[in-house]
Image: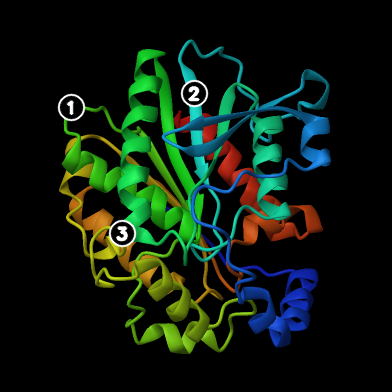
Amino acid sequence: MKVTKCQRRSCSTASLQTIIRPFGTLISKPGKPFPAGSPQLKIPSSAAKLCTIEERKVEDIWIYDISAKSSSVKPKSVPRDEIRSTKRRVYYIAGGSFCMPPSSDHWKFVTELSQRIPEVHISLLSPPLAPHSPAPLTYPQLMQLYQVLLTQSRETNESVCFAGDSSGANLALSLVLQGLQDFPTVEPPENILLISPVVDLSFTNPSIREVEKYDPVLRLPIEIETGKSWAASWRLDDLRLSPLFANLTNLRTNGVKVHGVVGTNDLLTPDAIRFREMCQEEGVEGEWLEWEKQMHCFPLAWHYHLPESIEGKHWIVDLLDQNM
């Protein structure tokens, strides 16, 4: 496991964190609940201008396949000369406390990934949302989706990465772990990418409350509330909800790499670091970026011209390009 640690923080990033911290409760508080089922997303005009976006439904869940238009392709930070013969696909699940669909920041992020690595097909998933579609109802549907998507990708010789941020990272990780157990004959993704992941819905790590003092975005009571809304009748330490307690042996034996990005001004990071250390102990390979004093999902703030967010986004682009 390779871990890159950065410590610098720009004045612009520090200032933004100071400005938004008093509004953290408003930022992280969920909006109006969505109806049961997979939300059909409205494609932003800005994304449609830069990318070709095709909408499809698999296992009753909406999926948005994103590919950059040739006129919008951007140069990579680390150019590659060779041409890959293997097709590559990232299945991305956006965060939103298990109860909100992808935001404009998510659309900007996946659009940027598509422009930077146009050879990689980006598929944005729209899972059903709590409270009307909590885990006991939604998870079996997501497992069926996982099986179908992986089967299709293998039939077309695609290299696959399951990725997500925050609660979406929780789902990406959990689905792969559960898939290794439930569908042993289905070849798993080669890579998992976790951006500021939720890995334990019990939030019992004592370090969380200390980090919360510096977190400009998340508030622990809201995270606990939304976690319980998603869990519904399931125990919070259920492995499908809290992969921190899962057995990671199958990841190692199947050669699944687990990559991650975390900022230390994020109350989810203490558990994420515990999970990374568990991966190291188990011998699971991967690369992680840990950045001091960065906030929750900081690479997704790249379009605000924050230096660390831009560098974090480039790190992700290079990681995907080099590992798929």
User: Could you say which is closer to the camera, residue 247 or residue 315?
Assistant: 247
Up/down of 141 relative to 12, above or below: above
State the CA–CA distance, disc 1 to disc 2: 21 Å
**Residue 138: x, y in percent?**
38, 52
Q: Answer with the quarter of the image where residue 246 lies.
A: bottom left
**Residue 91: x, y in percent?**
49, 37
Please, what is the three-letter code of the amino acid marked with disc 2? Answer: Arg
User: Could you say which is closer to the camera, residue 94 or residue 42?
Assistant: 42
State the CA–CA distance, disc 3 to disc 2: 31 Å
Write down the residue under mark 3: 136
Q: Is residue 208 left or right of residue 308?
A: left
Write down the residue under mark 1: 185
Q: Which mark is in front, 3 or 2?
A: 3
- Dot 1, crowdedness within 10 Å: few (<14), some or many (≥20)? few
**Residue 309: x, y in percent?**
68, 57
First in residue order: circle 3 vs circle 2: 2
For the residue labelled by badge 1, is the local secondary structure a helix, a strand or a loop?
Answer: loop
Please, what is the three-letter code of the amino acid marked with disc 3? Answer: Pro
Please say whether residue 285 is visible from this viewpoint: no
- Dot 3, crowdedness within 10 Å: few (<14), some or many (≥20)? few
Q: Answer with the quarter of the image where residue 78 lies.
A: top right
Identity of the residue drawn at 65% across and 37% down: 113
Whether residues under marks 3 and 1 lie with C-beta atoms below 8 angstroms apart, the answer is: no
